[in-house]
Image (cartoon, rainbow, N blue to C red):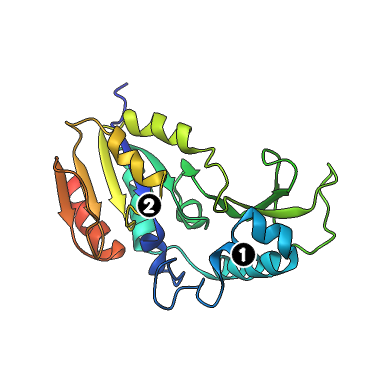
Amino acid sequence: MQTKPKLVVLTGAGISAESGLRTFRDSDGLWEGYDIYEVASPAGWEKDPALVLDFYNLRRKDVLNAQPNAAHTGLAKLEEHFDVRIITQNIDDLHERAGSSRVLHLHGEIVKMRSDINETELYPYADDIRIGDMAPDGGQFRPHVVWFGEAVTMIEPAVLEIVQADVFVLIGTSLNVYPAAGLVDYLREDVPKYIIDKKIPPVREGNYHLIEKPATEGMAELLTILMP
């Protein structure tokens, strides 16, 4: 039995923007009005955990109300011809709901929660998290989201996927956030690379096919190239 070529995809906020989830750096972005470090850092959590929980409870509602778009479903369709591995910087679950079977979340998942003592034991996040909602280990429940200043523990598994890529696709990320942005440096030179973005991010010279379009339009074009 012939194995499918491995297609590794790195996605950012731009792929979910067309589902109504505003991106981190948009002028009307959902973080506007909040000091990032007040709601997305260990220091902010220590200072005012109730504010942090309220912020992420709202983010979770936004995600649950959003629907996967054609870019998400297009990636799921590629599984017919490729062994697709998605590495996402997004904390939403739209890739999974669109039908993608292998998704690695670099920055956590808003639909899950964990103790503020133990980051490895995850629990489904069925309702708003409140102060006093305690994990079995005695810690306060918090969203399973990587905050500024916290280790991105999934970066090593992501590198293992990247170095094995036969084809690489980058969708909707500015390549400004590290360590995620450094993943492209692990690609083999000969790997065909596709970038879909309204504004192509800076990348090294190489075997790149640039598709300067929103994620849904760009994915439609990519499907005609990879699945003619």
Which residue occupies 38% across, 49% down? 76
Say which element carries label 1. helix
Position in image of residue 89 (x %, y %): 45, 51
Residue 126 visible at all:
no
Residue type at mark 2 is: Thr
Earlier sequence position, callout 1 versus callout 2: 2
Calculate the distance from the C-alpha at mark 1 to the C-alpha at mark 2.
23 Å
The disc labelled 1 sits on which kind of residue? Val
State the residue at coordinates (21%, 48%). Answer: 203
| Label 2, residues with CA under 10 Å away: few <14, some 14-19, many ≥20 | many
Q: In this view, does 117 lie to the left or right of 65?
A: right
Residue linked to disc 1: 39
Side of 52 where 18 appears, left or right: left
| Residue tagged 2 | 11
Please tell me which residue lies in front, 165 or 3.
Answer: 165
Q: Looking at the image, which is closer to me, 153 or 6?
A: 153
Query: Under tag 2, what secondary structure?
Result: strand
